[in-house]
Structures are given as structure tokens and as C-alpha cells.
Amino acid sequence: MFKIVFMGTPEFAACSLKALIDAGYDIPLVVTQPDRRGNRNKMILSPVKQLACEYGIETAQPVRLRKDEELIARLREMAPDMIVVAAFGQILPLSVLEIPRLGCINVHGSLLPDLRGAAPMQAAILRGLDESGVTIMRMEEGLDTGDMISKVACDIRGRDITEVSDILAHAGAKLLVETIPHIADGTAVYEKQDDSLSSYATMINKADGMTDFAEPAVMIERKIRAYKEWPACYSYLDGLQVKFYRAEALDEEPDGEPGTVSETGKDFYTINCAEGKLRIYEQQLQGKKRMSAGDFMRGHKLSTGDRFCSI
RNA sequence: CGCGGGGUAGAGCAGUCGGUAGCUCGUCGGGCUCAUAACCCGGAGGUCGGAGGUUCAAGUCCUCCCCCCGCAA
């Protein structure tokens, strides 16, 4: 029976794992990131681990797979036909890449060679792309540089990271189960990546969420969509942190310093940027739940001229 | 036992030194305007997260529990 070891961590990966399970593959082991303490020290299991537990699949959670000789030896012993990797979050050493006879197959959230790297979906949103997609490829030592086997394009116009991740996760999972048989029977076509067309999506930092109203409104609006899950776009009002979750960039002349409130509406307020204005519809004040701008203004008087700043 | 903020009307908030619980929005009824995120008048709606305790008297002070949020990881 066709044996697959799966490696992945977030929801995006869980979607592919589910597809493999539903397709009936033999999955003796799932490798995912170690359990981490989440908010207020509560243990949070990765979506992939949750799914694996649900189906009674054994899990391994190495701190550093590349240095876990025991696990690597175990993988070798299992002799899987294929290792499928999706947003695993760790680099696979050559010693692992060489184990499966059909190679390590990666589900990557971009149309390679564009947006190689850790956060391709966020990068696609930041760039304002109308279209992105998923590439199934055969992994090699370089970062997302392996030969491409199949691709699917998706419309991501105006979507936030939650939506893009969901769209690409499902498209990728579908593509994965369609592609594996071709890899297995040798009919798959391996296409080299054109390095001259490549780009990289760098890792996201907490500081990337600090909102700078000196940036154009359209850019800030993209960041709000891209960073919604983490770290979120935040600013400070009277020393209190406010995170923005839904906004619209207006192509209007600012009528005040960047960061100042231009106008307040019934269910929104508008902030002046260096270029254009940003209309906020949903936000969260520190210590409070996420709420609509209208709800926020019911309890906090916000008026024209009030200023959001970076502290 | 990581640090901190919070739970009060359908929603968002205020509530001082303990003394019959208030504001904005919504909602319901009535009125007014060419008009507005309108305006005016009136009404309904709360065992103040839960359980004890102190007190003549607890939203408020003390103890324990539940839930939510931010930071740090």
C-alpha cells in the first residue's frame, strides 16, 4: 500500500492532510511542530496534530528535525513511498529528503518561482496581487527551489489572509491528490524553476504590525488584510493599543496630519494617511474584544483631530 | 503557579468616600422637518459573571471559582 509520511503544522497543512486521509493513503506518521503555550499559558495543539489525533495517527514533534537522528532513523526504517510537506515550519535536511523513493513533495502557497519562502500568502496580499496560487513541487536542498510538478491559480483579489489561506489550502489539497498518482506512475512532468523570475517572501515580525500612517492608505489596508491573523496591524490611541481588522483605503486628500481622525461616521471612522485616508470598520482595543468601529465609538468618544500614533 | 486589563439594560461604556444603578446607541410609542449619522417628547428593558463573607446598608470592601482580552513566550 502506498505509504505517505505527512509533515505540516497550521490549518493550511491540515487541509492537505485531510485530503490524503480521505483519499485512502496509508499514513503511519505525521510530523508537526511541538505543542506551544498559547495565550496565557494555555497549551495549543497545531491543527495538524488535532486532525492526526482525531484519526488516531501517530505524531512526532521534533524541536529540530534536522538534528533529531532518532526520528530520521525511524523515517528511514519506515521507508515511506513519499513524504508530503505543507507549511511545516522547519527545514528538511538532505538525509530526510533522500529517504522516500518518490521524494519529498511540497505544497507551497504561491505560483513558483514567485514568492518562495515562509509567508507567501501574506506577501501576495501585501503586493496587491489579484491572483496567486499553489504549486506542488519536489523538494531539494534550496529553499522552495525544487522542480515544479503542478500548479493551480486562484483569485485572491481583496481577500484577507484568513480567506486566502482557506482558498489556497483547499485548492492545494485538491491539486495534491490529483498530482500524487502521476508522481507514482511516472507520468508527472518535472519543470525546472527559472531562478531569474524568483522572489522571496520574508518571514513576518511582530514589528511589521506597527502601523505607520506616513505610508499610503492602500498599503496599510493591504497590511491589515495580510497581518490579520498575526501580528495584526496596531497603533496607539491615548496610550492604548488598537488593532485594526477591517478597513478600506479611500482615494481622498488627507485633511490633517497622518494618524489624525479625519471624520467619524455611524459605523466607521476615517484616519488621515500621508496619501489617502483609511476608513476603519472593525478593530480591537487592548483588553477588549474585537468589535465594530460603531460599537467602539459608542463607549469611547472619538472626535476629529484625535490622533493615532506609534508610541 | 509568567505579567497585566476586564465581565453593569440588546450593543458599547461610566459609576467618586459603601447609601434605592446612569450615559450613548439600538428598540417600542408619539410628534416634527425639503433635508441629515436628523431633531423633540414619552416608554420598556438590570437578581451589576457565580458562590460565600464583612456591614444597619455592597456594583463598590475581603475570599474562592468561572469566562473574556492584551503582553510576554
Image (spheres, helix red, strand yellow):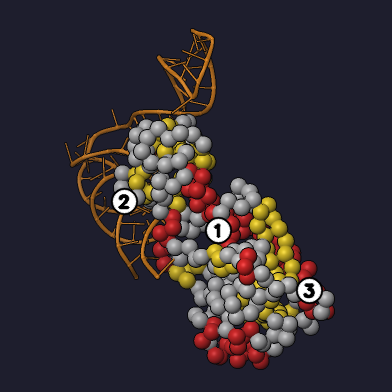
**Kind of residue at disc 3:** Val
Q: Earlier in the sequence, mark 2 or mark 1?
A: 1
Residue located 59% across and 77% down the image: A142
Q: CA distance from mark 2 to mark 3?
A: 54 Å
Q: Pinpoint the chain carrying mark 1.
A: A
Residue occupied by mark 1: A122
Label 2 element class? loop
Q: Are marks 2 and 3 on the same chain?
A: yes
Q: Pinpoint the chain carrying mark 2.
A: A
Q: Is residue A76 visible?
A: yes
Do the residues under discs 2 and 1 have CB atoms within 8 angstroms? no
Residue occupied by mark 2: A311
Q: Is residue A281 above or below residue A229?
A: above
Residue located 66% across and 92% down the image: A77
Residue occupied by mark 3: A189
Q: Earlier in the sequence, mark 2 or mark 3?
A: 3
